[in-house]
Image (cartoon, helix red, strand yellow):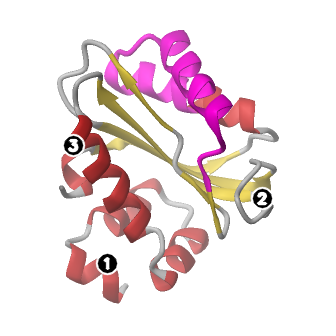
Amino acid sequence: MELADILLKDCVVGCAKVTSKRQLLQLFAQKAHESMGLDAQLVFETLMNREKLGSTGLGNGIAIPHGKIAGLSRVLAVFVRLDTPIEFDSVDDQPVDLAMMLLAPEGAGADHLKALARVARLLRTESLVESLRNSRECSEIHALLTAPLSDSAAA
């Protein structure tokens, strides 16, 4: 699964000014509403409920909040680069400044897991993470994230 298939150009926020995990999840929900027509409250509640099970903060300043929503036809993503890192209860106790939300249809077990694995693998690429942290333009961030795997590994 390629990120270009699930991350639309208008689903990238380059310089988010949020100060808490809750605000970040609200931003994801609002962006999903604006860009994809999803119910913002439903998206927010889905993300909050998932976080109650355990933090989606992977470490190294990266989080992948995710959840499943009935009625979706495919996996969808929103990426946010924060101006200032926020506390996220990550596994390494480090604040988060890069976050990718993934939403999947309720019955999308394999697709959801493939998307999570793809994003997690991509965001472990040190050179890409450094480029994302240095980028402020949404179009540049989108291009970095959606480059073919061999290109992004060399980014």
Question: What whole-number distance in Å separates the C-alpha atoms at marks 1 and 3?
Answer: 21 Å
Q: Give the range drawn in magenta.
A: 28-57
Nearest-to-viewer mark from 1 and 3: 3
Q: In which quarter of the image is residue 17?
A: top right
Whether residue 144 is situated above or below residue 72 in the rendered picture: below
Circle 1: element type: helix
Residue 138 appears at what percent x and percent y?
45, 54
> How busy is the neighbourhood of tag 2: few (under 14 within 10 Å), some, or many (20 plus)?
many
Q: Judging from the image, what secondary structure is the residue with disc 3 in?
A: helix
Q: Which residue is drawn at 60% across and 23% down?
A: 49
The amino acid type, in three-letter code, at marker 2 is Pro
Q: Which of marks 1 and 3 is nearer the N terminus?
A: 3
Looking at marks 2 and 1 on the same chain, the residue that comes earlier in the sequence is marked by 2
Amino acid type at mark 3? Asp
**Label number found at residue 152:** 1
Does 97 appear in magenta? Answer: no
- Total numbered labels: 3
As measured in the structure, the alpha-carbon distance from the residue carrying label 2 to the one carrying label 3 is: 28 Å
Q: Which of marks 2 and 1 is in front?
A: 2
Tell me, yes or no, if residue 26 can be seen here. yes
Q: Where is residue 111 in the image (x, y as percent from the top left)?
A: 21, 43
Q: In this view, does 118 lie above or below 27?
A: below
- Look at mark 3 in the image and give the residue it sits on: 111
Secondary structure of residue under mark 2: loop
Residue 22 versus residue 123 in the image, above or below: above
Which residue does the image show at 77% across and 57% down from the upper left?
85
Inspect the image, locate mark 1, and give the three-letter code of the amino acid beneath it. Answer: Ser
